[in-house]
Amino acid sequence: MSERKRILSGMRATSPKLHIGNYEGALRRWVELQNEGCEMFCMVADWHALTTLEGEPMDIRRNSLEVAKDFVAGGLDPAKSAIFIQSDVKEHAELHLLFSMVVGVGKLERNPTYKDMVSALSKSTLVSYGLLGYPVLQASDILLYKPYGVPVGKDQAPHLELSREIGRAFNSRYGEVFPEFKDLIDKDESRSKLPGLDADENGKLRKMSKSYGNCLYLNETEDETAARIKSAFTTPSKMRKTDPGIPEGCAVCQYLKLYSPDWEKQWAEDVAGERGCFQSKKELTEALNEFLRPMRERRAELDDDAILAILKDGADKAREVAQKTMDEVRAAMKLA
Ligand code: ATP
Ligand code: MG
């Protein structure tokens, strides 16, 4: 029996590019856990990218390959961690179907993320059965691997709770198949809930999200990163350099905290009206590009053939665990 702690986590293939929120909230932690010797299963969730059918159909396979490249560039070592695409391991779909029999529709309809997503959709967009069932698929993704823990950003906390409830509902009806898992969410919200470049209608920072497009991406040129930082939201009442800033509500100051060794001095000057936003943006650009440079260099060396081989190997490893769990599930449900 393996003594290693097993870890499962994933990212949606909704864009070919991961952003620094995905890195700080999840990927950074995955790399740490990998290096601590955990047994890692790192998934590109392609089926999850289909839950809303807004706009033109996207090239999900292309997105998946690019996301997997970001995983490796960000520090995952395919020799230590299984990196795979969700739809390459069909057991996720089978468990999703079986779990859909033990979860109440009311519980899914009350899910706050579902309500938010529906209200964010344009009136003409189909609210799909798949969108309502999103947490059921996520529960399958997780529980198939019976993980010790799931490292994710703070936005995922309600979904993890739902996954745990689905596991408990299954266990109480069919017997103990799924052990409880831990949320591994960074307590430091500046990492687990990293703000985006823009603000909401109330002038408050909102989460950086692939689907909002308010991102600083891991894999862009230094000039592209500089241009994005130029457009970043800062303290709205700070019109002149001498106006006091409010670093807690300023995206640029939040990023400085993570990437600049001098952030405490920079924040103090911002509050005292001793520095302008232009200077902060310039310094952030330098610090962030320096931080991302090694990842960008690693990524430039990865081609499609290399990533396809990594994903095949990862899917084989994931399937081995997934098939074992499904044998137990079918036996518990008297399907086999
Ligand atoms: P989408 O808009 O398509 O949902 P996303 O940017 O929210 O994309 P996901 O693929 O949903 O990214 O999430 C991948 C992982 O990154 C999850 O663990 C999630 O909690 C984490 N994450 C996403 N955005 C942030 C953020 N702004 N700060 C910290 N963690 C984040
Ligand atoms: Mg998301």
Image (cartoon, rainbow, N blue to C red):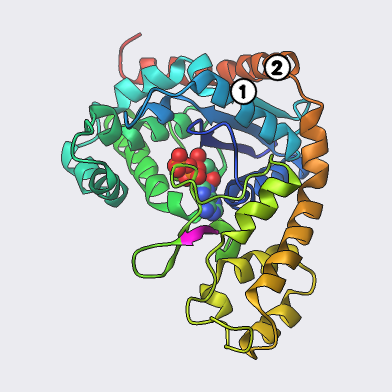
Q: Is residue 196 magenta?
A: yes
Q: Dot 2: what SS?
A: helix
Foreground of the two, 282 or 272: 282
Pinpoint residue 53: horizontal percent, then vertical percent: 32, 28
Amino acid type at image mark 1: Leu
Name the residue at 78% across, 59% down. Answer: 286
Residue, far front: 240
Do tag 2 and tag 1 residues touch (Cβ < 8 Å)?
Answer: yes
Residue drawn at (38%, 15%) of the image: 331
Mark 1: few/some/many CA within 10 Å (<14, 14-19, 20+): many
Q: Kindly tell me whether residue 307 is visible in this rendering.
A: yes
* Residue 114 among those drawn in magenta: no
The residue wearing badge 2 is 304
Residue 282 in picture, x, y percent from top left: 73, 65
Q: Which residue is mark 1?
A: 65
Instruction: Give the magenta part as a residue range.
Output: 193-198
**Please, is residue 310 above or below residue 257 in the view?**
above
Name the one closer to the observer, 41 or 122: 122
Decide if ligand 1 comes within 8 Å of the CB at mark 2. no
Question: Which secondary structure dominates the residues rendered in magenta?
Answer: strand
Say which amino acid is labelled 2: Asp
